């Protein structure tokens, strides 16, 4: 996100803060994230920060909604909602995630999974928003699988709700293992097994 600091551009100033905050949280976790580092990276002042966000929690929740949530919408929800071949599109998304995963993603892991593991047990506000986005993500997969079942792309006996949750859990698990091993090979092997599972759902 490119932005400028001129006060007559509040939207891009907010975007600049969110971009810097996301990078800081992704690298260090929410609790250890430094507002000083965020301000330094964004080139903005405390006044600009507190003009847009009441406190650190408000900033963290905005990162979850407007950066991580936006990624879920763009990467999963929109493509699956606009396809006539849901399963083929889902497999394509998984291939693209695997091929597009850069060193930083392997090093630092999935931002959503990181925040869920760190914050769900200790911060109700974060747990609520994480549950919301997990629900959005799962609903998109359920809807896609149900449409796939209706058009005969997958078997009639597939439990779409359970399959959707399992696919998401497997994706997050693959990313966590790849982070732990610091290995793209681990991601590809794990992802390959997930794709094999999805193919087994086919009619």
Image: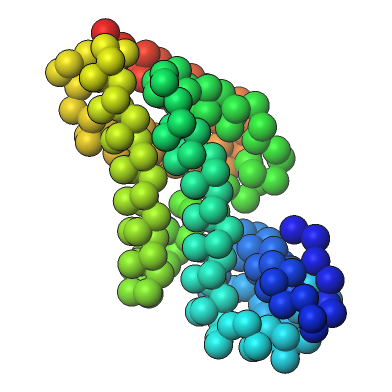
Residue 18 image point, x, y percent: 65, 68
89 vs 110: above or below: above
Q: Quadrant of residue 50?
A: bottom right
- Return the residue nearer the eye: 16 or 29: 16
- Return the residue nearer the eye: 129 or 166: 129
Q: Residue at x 45, y 41 (%)?
A: 77
Q: Is residue 77 at least partly visible in the picture?
A: yes
Residue 135 image point, x, y percent: 32, 51
Q: Residue at x 49, y 71 (%)?
A: 61
Q: Quadrant of residue 32?
A: bottom right
Q: Is residue 190 at least partly visible in the picture?
A: no
Q: Quadrant of residue 75?
A: top right
Q: Residue furthest bottom?
A: 47
Q: Residue at x 63, y 82 (%)?
A: 52
- Return the residue nearer the eye: 33 or 65: 65
In screen coordinates, is 157 left or right of 154? left
Q: Residue at x 39, y 45 (%)?
A: 137
108 vs 130: above or below: above
Residue 110 image point, x, y percent: 54, 48
Residue 48 image point, x, y percent: 72, 85
Q: Residue furthest left?
A: 157
Question: Which colour scheme appears in the figure?
Answer: rainbow
The image quadrant where one finds the C terminus is top left
The image quadrant where one finds the N terminus is bottom right
Q: Residue furthest top?
A: 203
In screen coordinates, is 77 left or right of 36? left
75 vs 30: above or below: above
């Amino acid at each position: 996100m490119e932005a400028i600091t001129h006060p007559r551009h509040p939207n891009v100033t907010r975007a600049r803060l969110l971009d810097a905050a996301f990078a800081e949280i992704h690298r260090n976790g929410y609790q250890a994230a430094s507002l000083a580092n965020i301000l330094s990276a964004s080139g903005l002042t405390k006044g600009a920060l507190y003009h847009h966000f009441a406190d650190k929690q408000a900033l963290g929740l905005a990162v979850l909604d407007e950066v991580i949530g936006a990624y879920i919408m763009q990467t999963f929800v929109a493509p699956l909602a606009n396809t006539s071949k849901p399963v083929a599109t889902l497999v394509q998304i998984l291939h693209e995630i695997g091929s597009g995963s850069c060193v930083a993603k392997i090093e630092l892991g999935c931002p959503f999974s990181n925040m869920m593991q760190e914050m769900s047990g200790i911060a109700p506000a974060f747990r609520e928003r994480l549950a919301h986005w997990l629900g959005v993500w799962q609903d998109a997969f359920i809807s896609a699988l149900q449409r796939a079942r209706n058009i005969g792309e997958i078997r009639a006996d597939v439990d779409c709700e359970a399959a959707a949750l399992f696919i998401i859990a497997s994706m997050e698990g693959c990313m966590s293992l790849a982070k732990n091993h610091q290995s793209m090979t681990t991601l590809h092997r794990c992802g390959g097994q997930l794709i094999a599972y999805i193919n087994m759902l086919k009619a």
